[in-house]
Image (spheres, rainbow, N blue to C red):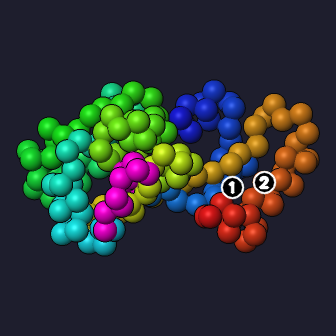
Amino acid sequence: SAHERLVKEGLLTDTTQVVLGQSKIGMAVSAKAKKPAPFRNKADFIAFLRKAKTIGLVDPKGGSGTSPPFMKAVEELGIAAEIAPKYRYIPGAGENVAEAIARGEVETGATAIPELVPNKGVKVVGALPADVLVFGSPTAAYLGPHASNPDEARKFLRFLATSAAMKAFRA
């Protein structure tokens, strides 16, 4: 993962990590499309996938942290043979999946919700239901060793851990 690589390179240490939350895998559709009903359980999720014509995923060959668990969940649901032909692998990161949805290259896509939300061209349908996949990737902030003002940076990291900052982050 990027985190492990940056620790090995000496650019991050876990001692300065402030966990901001857990990023769940979610799915989105174009902002222009009619927003489908949210999937609250396995049956709703399967119905959503079956209706979708194309599903954008971050190319797993590029080191995606979300595509492999998503594809494994679909496999464990017993519908991989039906759903996998709909996959379209998008190079890069999750925000590229959001862009592909917004441009109409794919009907829907799955990636970390924080990579979908900032794109005004998409609507998040929801997180994968817990009876399909329990996934949480930490979103964190760190103090790098080359900070020009480490004392102020530490104050900022402490602020990020406050309830006011967490509320803004969730929003």
Q: Indicate left or right for 107 with 137 as reference.
A: left
> Going 78% across and 34% down the picture, which residue do you hit?
145
Q: How many marks?
A: 2
x, y percent for residue 152:
90, 48
Amino acid beneath label 1? Val
Amino acid on which the number 2 mark rests in the picture: Leu
Find residue 157 and name its label: 2
Nearer the N terminus, badge 1 or badge 2?
1
Label 1 secondary element: strand
Q: Residues within 10 Å of mark 2 (few under 14, many from 20)?
A: many
What span is in magenta? 26-37
Q: Which mark is residue 18?
A: 1
Q: Is residue 67 above or below residue 78?
A: above
Q: Whole-percent x and y of residue 93?
A: 46, 35
- Please name the residue shown 40% across and 50% down the image: 32
Examine the structure image and report whether residue 171 is included in the region drawn in magenta. no
* Marks 1,2: beta carbons within 8 A: yes
What is the C-alpha distance between the residues marked 1 and 2? 7 Å
- As displayed, is residue 129 above or below residue 20? below
Q: Residues within 10 Å of mark 1 (few under 14, many from 20)?
A: some
Task: Tell me, yes or no, if residue 68 can be seen here.
Answer: no
Q: Position of residue 75 (x, y in %)?
A: 16, 50
